[in-house]
Image (cartoon, coloured by chain):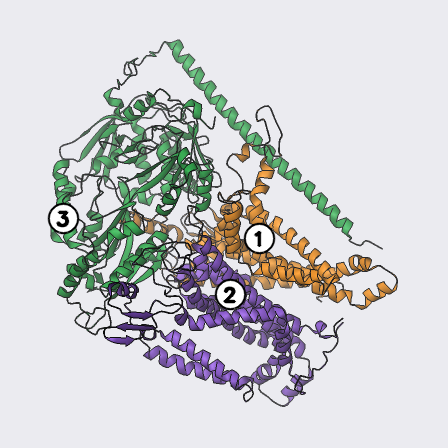
Chain colours: A purple, B green, C orange
Amino acid sequence: MSEMPTPAVSAHGEHETFSARVLRQTAARWGARIGFAWIGLVALAAVFAPFLANSHPLALKTPDGWSSPLLENLTWMDVSLLAAFIAVFVVWLLRRRLNGARRLAVLAVAVLASAVPAYLLVNPPQAVVFEKYRQGLVSGAVEQAVFVPVPYSPTDRSRDKPLSLSPPDSEHLMGTDEDGADVLSRMIHACRIALGIGFVATGIALVIGILFGGIMGFFTGWVEILMMRFLEIFESIPQLFLLLTVVAFFGRNIYLIMAVIGLTSWPGYARYLRAEFLKLRQQDFVQAAQACGLPIWSVLFRHMLPNGVAPLLVAASFGIASAILAEATLSFLGLGVVDAPSWGGMLNQAVGPGGTFAVWLATYPGLAIFLTVFAYNLIGEALRDAIDPHLQRAPG
Amino acid sequence: MGSRFGVKDLLLYLFLLIILVSIWLTMVQIDRQWSFIRLTQEKLDEQTRDIADLRRQLQRGVLVADSDRPAETTGGLPPTWEGFRRAHQASLAPDYAEGDWLINYFGSNLQRLTPMLSADAYASWVQEQVLDTLITRDPETLDWLPLLAESWAISEDGLTVRFTVRQGVTFSDGEPLTAADIAFTYRFIMDERIASPRARAYYSRIKSVTVEGNDVVFRYEEPYFGSFELAGTMQVLAEHFYGPYLESVERAEQFNSATGLLLGSGPYKLQDPVGWTPDQPVELVRNDRYWGWVQPPFDRMVWKVIQNDAATLTEFKNGDVDVYSARPLDYRELLKDEALLARTNHFEYYNARGGYSYIGWNQQRDGEPTRFADPRVRQALTYLTDRQRLVEEVFLGYAKPANGPFNPLGKQINPDIETRTFNLARAQSLLAEAGYEDRDGDGIIESADGEPFRFKLLYPAGSDDYKRVVLLIKDFYVKAGIIMEPEPTDWPLVLKALDEKAFDAISLGWTSGFEIDLYQFFHSSQMQPGGDNFLSYGNPELDSLIETARAEMDEAKRMEIWRRCHEILWADQPYTFLIWRASLNFIDERIQNVQRTRSGVNRPGLWQAPGEWYVPAARQKYDG
Amino acid sequence: MINYIIRRLLLMLPTLAGITVLVFSVMALAPGGIGANLMTSGGDMRPEERKAMVEYLNRRYGLDQPMTTQYLRWLNNIMPIGFATGPDGARGEFGFKTPDLGSSFVKNRPVLDLVAEALPITLLLNALTVPLVFVGSILMGVYTARFRGGALDVSIGTVNLALWSVPTIWMGVVLIGFLASEEYLKWFPTSGLSSLRSDSWNFLPTFGTPSEPGYQRGYLLDMLWHLVLPVICLTYSGFAFLTKLTRAAVLENLLSDYARTARAKGASERAVLWRHVFRNSLLPLITVTASILPGLLVGSVIVESIFSIDGMGRLAVEAVQMRDREVVLSITLITGMLTLFSYLLVDICYALADPRVSYE
């Protein structure tokens, strides 16, 4: 037995849309707040990683004058992420002036406009010898160097002073891994892969799931039967199994992994959307839209979708969490990308075969994975509670 | 209320289920007990048969005192029993006792024990305890000693080898072993219906194996220095046991899918020679009918399967495993453990059959010579590969830099050759000679056409040590302006890349031996698909030297030729040889007579002999 | 109802075919293809040996034929009716025959044997995990619904969510590192399912027999002792989802009309809960069981590899890494069949449990 949710009147005295109300109620819950705070932290770390942990000094004084090796060595990914961050900030400032769709459009344009030129133009030097700054300071070739807080790049393996698997000390706050690279630096840079996998994989899954679910929910007959079989096929294949198969047969490629995670997750979203659409199909506004002669895609995706998307958001939040877990598991099994830092990969190095237990390698990356996954789960829970009509009643 | 399914019903069903499961589990346990009783019964039967046999022999008045074996057992070994000298010496120790178990382990599941079928290294450890060969080597002097063969003769032209087979040898089930079994083994391997293509290829050099009285004669097409070893180290299969599998295609298929068909004349045997399956641990028991001069010391040899490395160490520390082979980092950590040092002995040694790792430079790709075709480039890269640092940082000193394919413990190596040490200046000048310099100031050196020196190094995925080595080397090369991109590759793809020669450089390893044949690796004829010269390396002088060495039957002359080959390889550097790894072992200290030899530690099965280790009676842990 | 079942069974076939085609295509399209790459040992490769091996395997398994032919051959092998195969791969006559899952390339044993060895172990693990998870979730779900909003509700909810977020890989490493190691507590063994000589022990624990004085753990207890850590790893994350589901269902029922009627008639809250509401709340759980069951088989891959247990998950991973085509396809088939069967089973149970649901 359920009641119709009472129309909410926002603080501004206008009617709130459903999605605005959901977001507001979600943000009000403490679980979601903690979740958003942690994700925000991780996102900041991902964007500003080169400025937080880098072996290249920010400013370098040699007999030839001042230079900034850090800026010279930024990659196109660094530049694009910074540009995207600025774009998000600008959009937030202008949020009153733009509605939802326009905001997305502005963001997309800004990101593309910065990513494409960056990819083409930004060309950092490839032959990097990290220890030359440290050695230069000792030998006098370098007069002064201003380093960022963590003066180690994730691939700086400390060749001037071999330091494999050393416990945390004043120089390496979280110790080093088995190759001698600084753990804190790798943790910060690994935020990129973690968030990237989550968003990209879930994004792919959402797009496919929405397409399929929408069509399945609207049409009946042989179209539905065929698509249902298709959905069952993808549902029945265990995700880890397919991931392992693809990695074993096609090699390790982070984009491929993201695609496979996306391809195995979409059935869940499709089912949710189909269930919602089956309910919405009978509603008046849909029939009215059809009667007006609007094309199908418009009916499905401009009219029905915004109303049915709520459970999808919940599922997406949990989906991001599980994508991150899947990537960590792959890296743990040794099938992740080699050089790039990843939390799962670091966890793998924690237990040596001879039973040497590097506690710092087990604690920090494990905590990072746990907190990120927990954060997404909290957000998902909060979203679910906000959407649930049962909880819209007056408290008591 | 009707027939509602309530909580009470649920509990009732659950209870019923538990009872049923318990009954079934009890039945399983009873089954296990029955099979144990059966095994005991079998053993008893065997012993009764043996006693009956002995009694009959006594009745017939057979000479019990063999004139071949003098009554005094102090050192007086007849020459035909030299293969047992070391074991015999061990048995003279005052605290020598038979008994106890030796517990070993495998790092992964063993699929098959059936000989000839498996490519498993693990299976061979087990098979070498159960099957015998004609000859064996002294682990220290490397001389060939008689085992199943009493004596042998090699013809002048090297095309015929004749072994005289010892009399009175029996398999573990009592059937006699004769020259016919050896000829049978050859027939068995070469039969197309048996799934042993690897063994077939290996023994295809033999033209024929014939029986002449007590002798077995191997004939070859052409003289080859390894012919004697090939024939002498063939593991002998029993005709009466394996012969029936040649009767028909169905029986051959049965053999091909059998997991545990292992019967031989060796010091140990499987209690059940047909029934082993991979879900059981491997247990060998002493062969009570062993024909050797010395009886096998251990009652049982057991191999547990422990796939998890951490679990292996835990079991070793608990004393559940007797021998532990450690990686450098763990070895160093373990040496700090006082309690462990008190209960074990540890050994670091180089094994004559151990292998070396290397980086192979592909000299031809897609029909075009690559930048690695220039020997100056290869030499420069070798100067940049700081082997000493590799040894210190990755292997913590438990390795030796390698400068050639010959094992430092063998006789082929040329002792005058030096290993190139890290020399950035020399490398850069060699590269400049070959036309590589940094023309645009970006830190990377380019060829004359402006192509940057950048390449991918393939290496087998899954090994941490390879990864660390490759990452370290990458940072060496960067100093000279060379960008190396590591590519961990799964094994099937590695093989594919080798077949198609579709790679820039590859890092792999080969196992070695006392005397290896360079032909398959470095002879130019092996460049064709399927050969192991996948680097398209060819040097006519080396080719002719290799051919001469292979046909040279005089060992001293042959070694001279191999040493000359070593010089050429040092100059040409088709591989950048990396390191020889040391074996690092901990052995429970109740085991006595563990010795270092030229071939490594004298573990049982090192060469076909009953083994030199034993546990004194007072210290034995397991009985039966 | 029977019609429905038959219709569902028939619809299963194209889905199964689709799954196998998908997996087969992934393997076929890969660089290296499905072919002879069956060197399990690395270093000692001799050219003649390898060539001989490749030819031999091509002949035996028909690996040099085009992909579609190979797929059709495999399909023919697994069906109960089809062309019988002669000893050399020649085609026999059409008729009934025993389905043949093929032989593993790497291990050269029939796939059925491999599965028969691995399946009971996985089933054992799951037989212990599933009841624990269900019972725990139901109890927690009921109590948090009963005392909703209270401290118990919030804390159980948060703890469950936190547990769900802990990656299994981390949990396994931590458990072994702290509870099964030398440095900290050595309460549990690190690997395997039984100790070395345990199959010569008695089944039940003994407390002093003439041959073995003193306490002897016994086979049963030994196996249970080995199972504790793996089962913990498998269960801890399962509570979150099911508890939430049960809670929602119980809550919905507690606020329903018939519950209100029962209270009005004077039943205690406890009676309302256990005698009326409880059974109706179990229905959503039945639906969820469907999605859990298939994951159980291959889902314990990580736990099996951390604890060195030879179940189906390990079999699948090794087969994939070794490109053991027959095993991979067979496991896909088995998992797919079990998934679809479990969906069907769940729908049937749903129809039986809830008289309002009908499939006609």
Is the residue A20 above or below the residue B289 in the image? below
| Cβ atoms at labels 2 and 1 below 8 Å apart | no
> Where does label 2 land, which residue?
A323
**Residue B408 seen:** yes
**Residue C5 seen:** no
Q: CA distance from mark 2 to mark 1?
A: 19 Å
Q: Secondary structure at mark 1?
A: helix
Residue furthest to the right: C265
Q: CA distance from mark 1 to mark 3?
A: 59 Å
> Where does label 3 land, which residue?
B567
Is the residue B44 above or below the residue B533 in the image? above
Q: Are labels 3 and 2 assigned to the same chain?
A: no
> Image quarter for residue C207?
top right
The chain ID associated with circle 3 is: B
Amino acid carrying mark 3 in the image: Glu
Is the residue B159 above or below the residue C345 in the image? above
Q: Out of B236 and A145, give the one closest to the viewer.
A: A145
* Residue C30 placement, left or right of B560: right
Residue found at x 41% / y 52%: C90
Q: Secondary structure at mark 2?
A: helix
Residue A23 on image: x %, y %: 61, 77
Amino acid carrying mark 1 in the image: Leu
> Where does label 1 land, which residue?
C234
Q: Secondary structure at mark 3?
A: helix
Residue found at x 44% / y 44%: B109
Is the residue A211 above or below the residue A15 in the image? above
Amino acid carrying mark 2 in the image: Ala
Residue B196 on image: x %, y %: 34, 43
Q: Out of A84 and B220, give the one closest to the viewer.
A: A84
